[in-house]
Image (cartoon, rainbow, N blue to C red):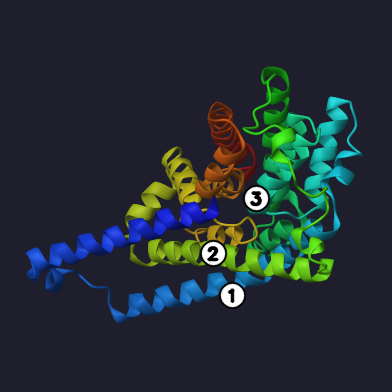
Amino acid sequence: MRAFVSQIGMHLFFLFLMFLLISVMVNPAMFTEIPWPGTDAIQSFKTMLISIVLEAVPFILLGVLVSAALQAYVSERWLARFLPQNPVAGILVACVFGILFPICECGMIPVVRRLIAKGMPLYIGIVFMLVGPIVNPVVYAATYTAFRARPEMLYARMGLALFVGICIGWLIRYFVKTNPLKRVSATLYAGAPEAGDHHHHARGGSKLVSMLEHAGSEFFDMGKYLMLGAMATAAVQTFMPRDALVDIGQGPVSSHLFMMGFAYALSLCSTSDAFVASSFVHTFSFGSLLTFLVFGPMLDLKSTFMMLSVFKTRFVVLLMVLIGCFVWIGAMFVEHFYFTA
């Protein structure tokens, strides 16, 4: 599915180049009339881009190493064995799993699919999928580093993520009675090795080699999204008129909607989005930055395609509506009673 999303992006890019080429051929004068940015703007863009990337790369590297270790050494069957039957305890355990196992949102959906197919209750899996990418130690450290001057943003992000995940989990438990997986366990695991095994084991490779290969692949995959997000952020900060950006960023509704759309389109990894958000501290309200930090890891463009490949469309639409409503309302509540206190 990630390859499919990448192919769509490449096709759109080439279509844009073709449109630009045809436009220049039809009207060559337009090329000379474009108001190209000056040297200072280009230098500012490069400086901001490099600073965002350099701050985020160590956390992405740490995150993919831990994620790869879990992929190689921890089986989903082993995790599911310890789930309690009590729904309250089950949701709390899902939150604890999210804190203890630093899997970013990019690797969370396949893991949750395997857990649900092996018997994990749906509502527990959804809480784990929504909360885990935000409250894990790597994201905690990244957010703390990005918002050293405003530590309250760190606590607000963790608290709102837990609140949204728990509320959605409870609603799913009471109102979703059918299995939303597109493939049942019998077909999903037909001919597949047992949980915890990796295809490299069948070839005699070691778990360490498997872990390093998985980490390398995920690092370069996440690096693409980081670069795209950092470039978009640096471009918005450098080339978008400051007055227009401030008007959007301080609006009680427009700032939240803009940041939700921004987070959805950028599809940043949760280990790096805090550094992008921190670059907007002096432009956007803290409530809208909180919306960006919680909404993006729970729902973005790439995770939407991944969820559509795993869950039925109706269930994905339900999740999207619930995430959007709870994050928006929760962030506005926190902004009113916490950041303005």
Q: Of tags 1 and 2, which is closer to the observer?
A: 2
Cα–Cα gap, marks 1 and 2: 11 Å
Residue type at numbered disc 2 = Leu
In the rendered image of this protein, does residue 44 appear above or below residue 112? below
**For numbered disc 2, what is the local secondary structure?**
helix
Name the residue: 82% across, 55% down. 197
Instruction: Classify residue 335 as left or right of residue 82.
Output: left
Q: Which residue is mark 3?
A: 105
Read off the residue under disc 2. 226
Q: Position of residue 21 (x, y in %)?
A: 19, 66
**Number of callouts:** 3
Residue type of the residue flagged with mark 1? Leu
* Of the image marks 3 and 1, the number of the one nearer the N terminus: 1
Q: Please rate how many residues cluster around mark 1, counting C-alpha atoms within 10 Å: few if below 14, some from 14 to 19, many from 20.
A: few
Q: Is residue 267 above or below residue 322?
A: below
State the image quarter where residue 160 is shown: top right
- Contact, CB < 8 Å: mark 3 with mark 1? no
168 lies above or below 104 = above
Cα distance in 3D space between marks 2 and 3: 14 Å
Q: Nearer the viewer, residue 31 or 108?
A: 108
Task: Name the residue carrying label 1.
Answer: 54
Element class at badge 1: helix
Residue 259 image point, x, y percent = 48, 47
Cα distance, mark 3 to mark 1? 21 Å
Q: Residue at x 59, y 47 (%)?
A: 290
Residue 303 appears in view: yes
Q: Nearer the viewer, mark 3 or mark 1?
A: 3
Mark found first going from the N terminus, 1 or 2: 1
